[in-house]
Image: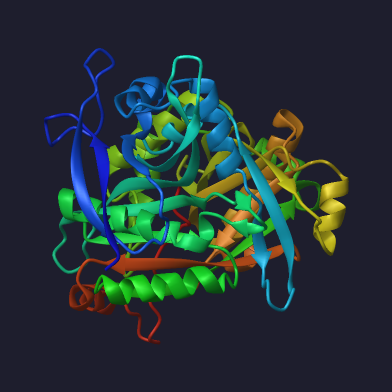
Amino acid sequence: MGKIRTFHYFRPLERDRMDFHPEEPLRFDSFEIKVIDRFKEQLELLVVPVRSLERIDEVLADVGLNTSRDFFREQCQEVISVPEKHFNEQTGQGLLTFRVYFRNLPDSLASINGRALVVLCLHPLKDKDQAGKRNYRIAGYAHVNSFDYMDQSSGALCPSYYYNLLRVSTFSENGKALYRQCGMFATIFSIFDELTRINGVNVGYANFGKDNRGMQRSMETLSRVFKKGYNQFPVDSYIKINRLFRSRKWSKRLVDISEDDARIRNFHKKLLERRDMFLLNQYATYDSFKEMFERVRAYSTTSGIYMLQGKNGEILAAALAINWGDYFNLTLEEPRGLFKLISSLKITERILWPIHFVGEVSDVAKLLKGLAYLYEKKHKVHLSLMMSQRGDPYARLKRSVLHDPFVYFTMYNKAKEYQDLEASCRTEDGRISIFTETPLT
């Protein structure tokens, strides 16, 4: 395969730690990998714990590049916030192209998955800054989020990676996308593959947009080249206008249990009860769920866990409500159909994302109506994002005419083992259910 490149993996000496203490010096190990990109120039390939991005100036100093944090953030926004086209580029079918502007990088992203690694493909340029350090472009950017899932057959906790924010720069020269045309995504994938080997991870999963044929062909080719297990799973994304389905009545019945450890523990127990026969579950233990929730709450104080209670104080329905607008601003570009109306109302800056539902369908319907009213009135959140997959018992509650389908893919280090894993999660009708909920980034 192609050429040999080297990436620098910034990590502590102790293998059981994901990132550095604030006072300890940064260090890295270097790994050679085979890549199939056709880019002819130098690349600085870095893997950095997301919580160490606050020290990106030290990371960049180690590889002789511009150490300005502001310059790095600008580069990140330019690459991360490229338009995502959720329609078929060949047929023109589809309604949606959007651009996401993340707030407060890297704190916002680190608040969700503190174990995440950031993969950076930096292209050093000839020009230099005032300190004589070379400037650069971010040619590729990706997150490797780390989660433990419960293996259905053995009952053991196993590490997995969720790849998100897979971005390749759209920078063009002479009308051609410089980095996309040379297979930069394949280089990012080669780093993913080496990280699974280094850290003993078998399962990796990610998402990409609707009918992105180029990405799908790339994944099929890469899975064949690297001899991986591979499959795709459709996901439906819906946007609901809170004013159209909110309920003041059910809002008054909501109970905020965000500070009630006993009820949160019971909530998580109920989540596990409906997770049999699913391929992956990000929070298979209470400690992992509580750690995630505490991080989210520390960053987004308007997010929380809400319930409807029965006559004896029991949980009839509950969900984690994330004020997604605290994390990013969504801008629709050249929207079509009803998305055009949504864009004209200028209400996309704040979005509610309710996830991890428990309870009977009728009770969850009341819960969602109450949350829609609460977040619109109290936090000026006008839209709710809801995602559904095959086997979702709450699918009909989430449906909306504002519909955007996309795809997840999963990969396994050994194809045979992946087939066995899927077989253990196959339902009687032959369906494979991958997630109970769309994974958090």
The one nearer the camera, 215 or 256, is 215
- Image position of 156 with respect to 291: above or below: below
In percent of the image, x 35 and y 80: which residue is there?
427
Quadrant of res 197 = bottom left
**Residue 104 is drawn in which quadrant?**
top right
Please determine whether, in this image, residue 357 is positioned above or below residue 348.
below
- Estimate the x, y position of residue 419 in percent, counting from the top left: 25, 78
Residue 197 visible in the shown view: yes
Name which quarter of the figure residue 87 lies in.
bottom right
Quadrant placement of the N terminus: bottom left
* Residue at x 46% of width, y 57% of height: 437
Residue ranking furthest to the bottom: 429
**Left or right: where 194 falls relative to 386:** left
Q: Position of residue 117 (x, y in %)?
A: 33, 40
- 12 up-or-down from 345: above or below: above
Residue appearing at x 39%, y 76% in the figure: 220
